[in-house]
Amino acid sequence: MTNNRIDTAFKNLRENNETALVTFITMGDPDIDTSKKLVIEMEKSGASLIELGIPFSDPMAEGPVIQEANVRALDNKDGITLDKIFDAVKELRCETQIPLVYLMYYNSLLTYGREKFFERCTECGIDGVIIPDLPFEESGEIYDYTEKYGVYQISLVSPTSSEERMKKICDRAKGFLYCVSSMGVTGVRDGFNTDFDNMFAKLNSFSDMPKCIGFGISKPEHVAALKHYCDGVIVGSAIVKQVAAGSTPSEKINNVKQKVQELKEAAAE
């Protein structure tokens, strides 16, 4: 089995002492063709890894910005399906080898069929999945499939996780650890109250696995303040807002390009 692109990306970033910029869009918002162009533009603008949101009617971990993007994608006149998203990823793989990770809810995967889903991930070039409503304790539901097809389940760890739970998650983790910045749903925040020194001292004692902070990171100042703790920063809602703000596909793409460049500069300083 070939190396997972996530491992290769973080190995290269660490060798060059660079902070990863992980970006997110909702597939199909505003349409699938624009989503593909956004992926290419984000990579050109400095993204290291891209999360692709699978639209879902009840995205429980998401704040209003990403919830609205889900609604826009699901309301799209052309219809959005997991098969269309897989096809789009397959087409993207002709143009880019950037790591691509699905962020999705378990019901979408279960409805599609577990074996079929992971087989298609490998066939089309998806490197990992983040499933907010499938906690670590229930990850056995898909563990055999992730192992068989070489698709990583990216684990989430929160500031309130016990040391015992953190260690168990670290022991099983693949790709990178998604470190939740603060409790609640995704969305833009002004600041963070989490004791990151304490959180990362524990996590680093358990594992050398790359660690990325997500939830609420929206400004270059956030990136500059947090990058010293971790291997990467994850930005979702702030980018999705730029997609929503544009009135035409080209304007949306340009908005996202500018935002990603701005965040990349902060990560590189």
Image: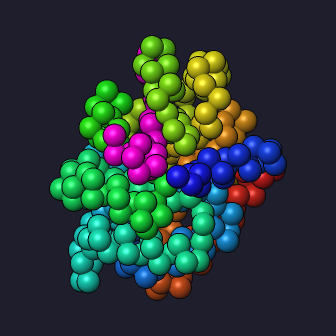
**Total marks drawn?**
0
Vertical position of residue 256 compared to residue 227: above or below: below
Q: Which residues are magenta?
A: 144-162
Q: Position of residue 268 (x, y in %)?
A: 78, 52
Q: Is residue 8 left or right of residue 127?
A: right
Q: Position of residue 181 (x, y in %)?
A: 52, 35
Residue shown at the point (81%, 48%) measured from the top left: 16
Q: Position of residue 100 (x, y in %)?
A: 51, 59
Q: Position of residue 251 (x, y in %)?
A: 53, 82
Residue shown at the point (49%, 33%) measured from the top left: 173
Q: Is residue 181 visible?
A: no
Farthest residue toward the front? Answer: 1
Vertical position of residue 135 compared to residue 185: above or below: above
Q: Is residue 56 left or right of residue 226?
A: left
Residue shown at the point (32%, 34%) measured from the top left: 139
The verdict on residue 210 being magenta is no
Residue shown at the point (56%, 58%) measured from the top left: 99
Would you identify the image quadrant in which residue 162 lies? top left
Q: Is residue 106 visible?
A: yes
Please name whichever residue, 238 or 229, is drawn nearer the observer in this view of the structure: 229
Vertical position of residue 199 compared to residue 107: above or below: above
Please name whichever residue, 35 or 129, is drawn nearer the observer in this view of the structure: 129
Please name whichever residue, 11 or 227, is drawn nearer the observer in this view of the structure: 11
Please name whichever residue, 254 or 155, is drawn nearer the observer in this view of the structure: 155
- The way the protein has been coloured in the rendering is rainbow
